[in-house]
């Protein structure tokens, strides 16, 4: 809900821009607004949740950001490798994927689920439908983190 509210506030803030072109933004920048709202609203979660639940929600959110940044790095590196190695074999692709998972994480035990691990990249639809777009989510998340940092600095100087 906070994410979608970020999109809504962004649209409201931009609707009276004198230059028509500035009244909307590319999708990746729109995500800066929505992801920023998730972070900016975090101190107010106790309006809806108990203090313990709000703390858990904030922690889960921040952990999710770290996790998704690693996932985005893996997906981006994987597709760069795919497109720069057009003659690769299935085994080479599998080895590249597993190597990237290990490089950017690899702490989980996948024993008994080796195939699911090796073909986990299938779940990322951007690889099939929007090549090289997925990095935009990481860039938008960095923008949102910068907005959050700026808000923290603004509060400190009040
Ligand atoms: Zn969104």
Image (cartoon, rainbow, N blue to C red):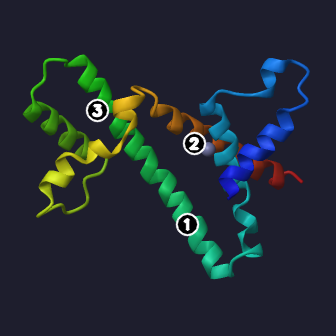
The residue nearer to you, when weighing 123 against 112, is 123
Rendering coords of residue 30 (x, y %): 67, 36
Rendering coords of residue 19 (x, y %): 86, 18
Q: What residue appears at the point 75 percent right and 28 percent down from the top-left corner?
A: 24
Ligand 1 positioned in quadrant: top right
- Would you say 62 lies left or right of 131 here? right
Judge whether residue 76 can be spotted in this image. Answer: no
- Would you say 105 lies left or right of 36 here? left
Query: Which residue in the structure is indicated by mark 1?
Result: 59
Rendering coords of residue 83 (x, y %): 27, 20
Query: Which residue in the structure is indicated by mark 3?
Result: 78
Quick one: label 3, few (<14), some, or many (20+) residues within 10 Å? many
Q: What residue appears at the point 80 percent right and 23 percent down from the top-left corner?
A: 22
Judge whether residue 71 can be spotted in this image. Answer: yes
- Indicate yes or no: mark 3 CB to ligand 1 under 8 Å: no
Q: Earlier in the sequence, mark 3 or mark 2?
A: 3
- Residue 141, numbered label: 2
Q: Earlier in the sequence, mark 1 or mark 3?
A: 1
Q: What residue appears at the point 78 percent right and 19 percent down from the top-left corner?
A: 21
SS of the residue under disc 3: helix
Q: What residue appears at the point 82 percent right and 54 percent down from the top-left corner?
A: 155
Tell me the CA gap for discs 1 and 2.
16 Å
Rendering coords of residue 36 (x, y %): 68, 47
Quick one: label 1, few (<14), some, or many (20+) residues within 10 Å? few
Q: Earlier in the sequence, mark 1 or mark 2?
A: 1
Which of labels 1 and 3 is toward the front? 3
Q: Looking at the figure, which quarter contains the C terminus?
A: bottom right
In the image, residue 100 sits, relative to residue 89, either above or below, namely: below
Q: Quadrant of residue 97?
A: top left
Q: Tell me whether the residue at label 1 lies in contact with that at label 3, contact meaning CB atoms closer than 8 angstroms.
A: no
């Amino acid at each position: 809900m906070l994410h979608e509210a970020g999109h809504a506030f962004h649209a409201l803030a931009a609707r009276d821009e004198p230059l028509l072109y500035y009244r909307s933004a590319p999708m990746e920048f729109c995500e800066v607004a929505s992801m920023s709202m998730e972070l900016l609203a975090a101190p107010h979660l106790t309006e809806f949740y108990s203090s313990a639940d709000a703390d858990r929600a904030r922690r889960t959110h921040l952990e999710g950001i770290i996790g998704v940044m690693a996932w985005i790095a893996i997906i981006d590196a994987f597709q760069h490798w795919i497109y720069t190695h057009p003659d690769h074999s299935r085994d080479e692709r599998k080895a590249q994927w597993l190597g990237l998972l290990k490089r950017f994480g690899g702490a989980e035990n996948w024993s008994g689920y080796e195939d699911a691990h090796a073909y986990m990249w299938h779940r990322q639809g951007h690889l099939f439908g929007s090549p090289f777009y997925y990095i935009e989510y990481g860039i938008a998340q960095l923008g949102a983190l910068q907005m959050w940092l700026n808000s923290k600095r603004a509060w400190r100087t009040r």
